[in-house]
Amino acid sequence: MLLFPSASAENYVTFSSTLPDLPELSVCLWLRVEASHVGTLLSYATDDNDNQLVLYGRNSSSSSSASSSPSLHRRLPVSSILDARWHHLCVVWSSIQGRFWYYSDRRLTSSGSNFRKGWEIPGGGSVVLGQEQDTVGGGFDPTEGFAGQVAGFKVWNRVLSPSEVVGVAEGRGVPRGVVLGMEDIEEVHGEVQQVACECLEHCL
C-alpha cells in the first residue's frame, strides 16, 4: 500500500515499466482519501502529449476527470468516496467501442459513448502516481498532488467485464491482461511510504 501524507511536488511514485499501445484499458485501485481535494491519482505522459491519460479528482462538489487529451475528458462522480474509508474504483475504456465505464465499490456509477473512438493510447511513455506531469517525468505542481492512500493499482490492456470488476474488488484473483501494477514500482519519492496492506476486500 502507498501512503501519500500530503499533496506535494516531491511526493510521487514512478515505475520501472511503461505502457504498450492501448486501444483499450482498465485501471483499478483501492483508494482512501479524507479531504475534498483528491488531486492526481495517475498521469501518463509521452513526448507528444503530457496528458495522454490523467485521473484527477477535484473538490467534493465537483468530480473526477479521466482525461485522454487536454481538450477531451469525462467528469466522474467522486463525492461519495471522500469519507476517509476505503473504496474500490475502476475506470474502463474502449477505443473500439468508443465507450467508457466507471465503477465505484463494484457498482457501475457512470458510463458514456462517443468517447475517443478509433484512438489509441501510445506506448512508451512515463507513468506516475500522485502527480500530474507537465513534461515527461516532471513538471509537477504541488496543487495537483494526491494526498491519501492507494492499494491494488493495476492496468489491464483490455476491457474488464462487470463480473471481473467485482472479482477484483472482492480479491478473487487477477484477470488476464495486466500490463502494469504495484509490483512494477521503481521508486517512491519524497515522503511517500510503502506500508503493509489491510485486507481490503472486506472494506466494502
Image (cartoon, rainbow, N blue to C red):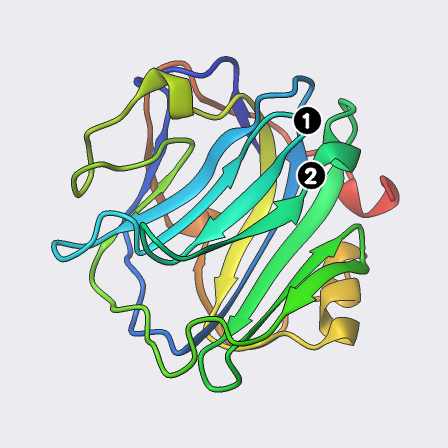
Q: Quadrant of the C terminus?
A: top right
Residue type for callout 1: Ser
Residue 147 sits above or below residue 48 on the image: above
Q: Secondary structure at mark 2?
A: loop
Between marks 2 and 1, how big is the CA–CA gap?
7 Å
Q: Position of residue 25 (x, y in %)?
A: 48, 70
Determine which residue is flagged by label 1. 60
Q: What residue is pinned by disc 2?
A: 78
Apparent side of residue 60 relative to residue 142 in the rendered image (left or right): right
Question: Which disc number belongs to residue 181?
Answer: none
- The quadrant in which residue 123 appears is bottom left
Task: Give neighbour class at mark 1: few <14, some 14-19, many 20+ (Cα, 10 Å).
Answer: some
Amino acid at circle 2:
Val
Horizontal arrangement in the rendering, residue 198 relative to residue 16 (left or right): right
Secondary structure of the residue carrying tag 1 is loop
Viewer-nearest residue: 107 or 154: 107
Task: Find residue 28 and report its horizontal and vertical position in percent.
Answer: 60, 55
Q: Is residue 14 left or right of residue 61?
A: left
